[in-house]
Image (cartoon, rainbow, N blue to C red):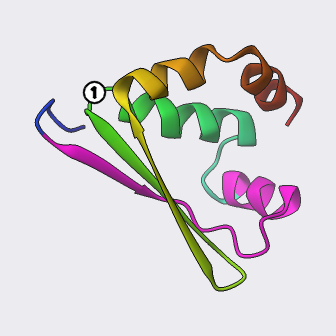
């Protein structure tokens, strides 16, 4: 956990950016894909900003989400539905 003056950096690497790869990652961590996503988001809520970095097919993409954007993501019905279907 970080305090409110720090930035949480979360690097997620999914080599082929496929559902099967993400499921394997979750299984290797002893959890489900749904819980893995929830864990990533909820672990970040105590920081002011979180950075998601994914390296797929040699392309690095980084997105930063403010605390309000994180809360909006958690409350987004479409995202909730997609997470529950995984």
Residue 22 place in picture, x, y as percent:
75, 57
Q: Is residue 47 magenta?
A: no
Q: Please report the residue visible at 60 percent of the width from the left and 54 percent of the height from the top.
A: 29
Is 33 on the left-hand or right-hand side of 58? right
Residue 32 located left or right of residue 85? left
Dot 1, crowdedness within 10 Å: few (<14), some or many (≥20)?
some
Split into 4 quadrants, where in the image is the C terminus?
Answer: top right
Q: Quadrant of residue 44?
A: top left
Residue that mark 1 sits on: 46
Name the side, left or right, on which 16 lies relative to 6: right
Q: Nearer the viewer, residue 37 or 78?
A: 78
Question: In the rendering, at what x and y percent does residue 59 appear?
Answer: 63, 79
Residue at x-position 72% and y-position 53%: 27
- Give the answer, above or below, for where 47 lies relative to 81: below
Q: Residue furthest left?
A: 5
Quarter of the image that includes the N terminus: top left
Q: Give the secondary structure at mark 1.
A: loop
Q: Does the magenta portion include 10?
A: yes
Residue 67 found in image quarter: top left
Quarter of the view holding residue 72: top right
- Residue 79: x %, y % from top left: 73, 26
Magenta residues (range): 6-27
Numbered-mark total: 1
Q: Residue furthest bottom?
A: 58
Which of 62 and 24 lies nearest the eye of the viewer? 62
Residue 58 place in picture, x, y as percent: 65, 86
Nearer-the-camera pick, 79 or 2: 79
Figure check: 39 above or below 22: above
Residue drawn at x 66%, y 42% as measured from the top left:
31
């Amino acid at each position: 956990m970080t305090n409110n003056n720090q930035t949480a950096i979360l690097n997620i690497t999914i080599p082929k950016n496929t559902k099967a790869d993400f499921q394997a990652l979750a299984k290797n961590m002893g959890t489900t894909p749904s819980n893995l996503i929830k864990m990533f988001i909820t672990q970040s809520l105590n920081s002011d900003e979180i950075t998601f970095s994914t390296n797929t097919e040699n392309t690095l993409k980084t997105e930063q989400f403010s605390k309000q954007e994180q809360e909006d993501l958690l409350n987004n019905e479409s995202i909730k539905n997609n997470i529950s279907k995984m």
